[in-house]
Image (cartoon, helix red, strand yellow):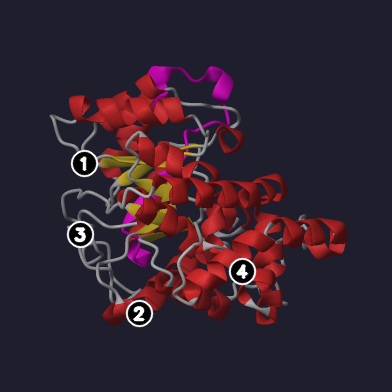
Amino acid sequence: MAVSDTSLPTTPTSSTHSTSETTMGNLPPTRLPNGVYVPMLAFFNSEDEIDIPTTQRHTARLLSAGVTGLVVHGSNGEAVHMSRKERRAVIEAVVDAVRHEVDSLQQPVPIIAGCSAASVKETTELCREACEAGATHALILPPGYYSGLLNKSMIVKYFHDVADQSPVPILVYNFPPAANGVDLDSDTILDIAAHPKVVGVKLTCGNTGKLARLVADTPKVRGGRNDFFVAGGSADFILQGLVVGARGTISGFANLAPRACVRIGELFEEGKLAEARELQHQVARADWLAIRYGFVGVKAAMPYFWGDGEQCATAPRAPFQALHEQNPEGVAEIQRGMASVLEIEREFEQGKALAA
């Protein structure tokens, strides 16, 4: 997926910056480049500690596949299973891996960190810690723990207060299952988007009508600026989003098939709609398995897509178990259902075009 704006400041060159030195810490918000963003899996070693080598290896291969940006501590990233110290360590590992790849990259790499908490105070603390670790943006859920007591104005004020205090720009994360059922409608998101430091939204709700309204109407609440990053949150509607003006996708399935996800956007931009549609069909079929089995299923597919050396990448944190331990047939189903996309991904890796 081509990038139409490369105004993002340079990715940090060290994971030890103070807040005042970190990328974007004291700079005005800038438009996120269009493209595929990958909400990265979290990896743990046999001692149940953060697996830094696997994290950095995965970062490097995603970048080599042509993705635009990376998301840490999204729903695929098991942030709720980590301490604050561990969350910082993961961000620093990803930042350092990006730094080592920077010479081969054509533009800076946004690194978006999930920073959700129930209060403004803790959320802004997470934003500051993410910034210090090198993240360029924060991804934030609505505060859904006391969802029955919230109203629209409280939710809008929550995001605006966080944006006022965060050292990095923020994106709204609309994913009702992860926010105790809170599903932000387009009117509420538009009110939130009026804040200049709220620079985008991830719509894992899958509502493409909402996506279309936000693309059309965010310039009206942002002083005419067409700088708001609207993205779907699943690989099964990348093309549908692009047709109505989405700037990209933030898709967990891109952990497995990043080139296929990128190629859908390229085909759309080239006007090859029949090819884009066929590839979207293939990706949607495979992504349905990732959706059904969740991050445990995506982890189970890592060795299938990236080689047997990634068996270490399949373990989630307790109380979850690796899929091969609890449901071997589920692993087999994933392999069968994702076989065609794996073949396509390998063809793209070898530089072959998708057959019409």
Real-space Cα distance between discs 3 and 2?
A: 17 Å
Location of residue 100 with respect to 259 vertically, above or below: below
How far is disc 2 from disc 4 in space, using C-alphas? 20 Å
Q: Position of residue 231 (x, y in %)?
A: 39, 42
Residue beneath disc 4: 43
**What residue is rendered at 28% in x and 47% in y?**
169
Magenta stretch: includes residue 150: yes
Over which residues does the magenta segment extend? 132-155
Examine the structure image and report whether residue 28 is included in the region drawn in magenta.
no
- Whether 135 is drawn above or below 138: the answer is below
For discs 2 and 4, the disc positioned in front in the rendered view: 2
Give the SS element for disc 1: loop
Instruction: Please tell me how crowded label 1 is: few (under 14), some (14-19), or many (20+) other residues with Cα within 10 Å.
Output: many
Q: Which of marks 3 and 2 is nearer the N terminus?
A: 3
Residue at (20, 54) in percent of width and height: 5
Judge by depth and name the residue closer to the eye, 86 or 352: 352
Does residue 308 appear in the picture of this structure? yes
Which one is closest to the eye, mark 4 or mark 1?
Answer: 1
Q: What residue type is labelled 2?
A: Glu
Where does label 3 land, which residue?
6
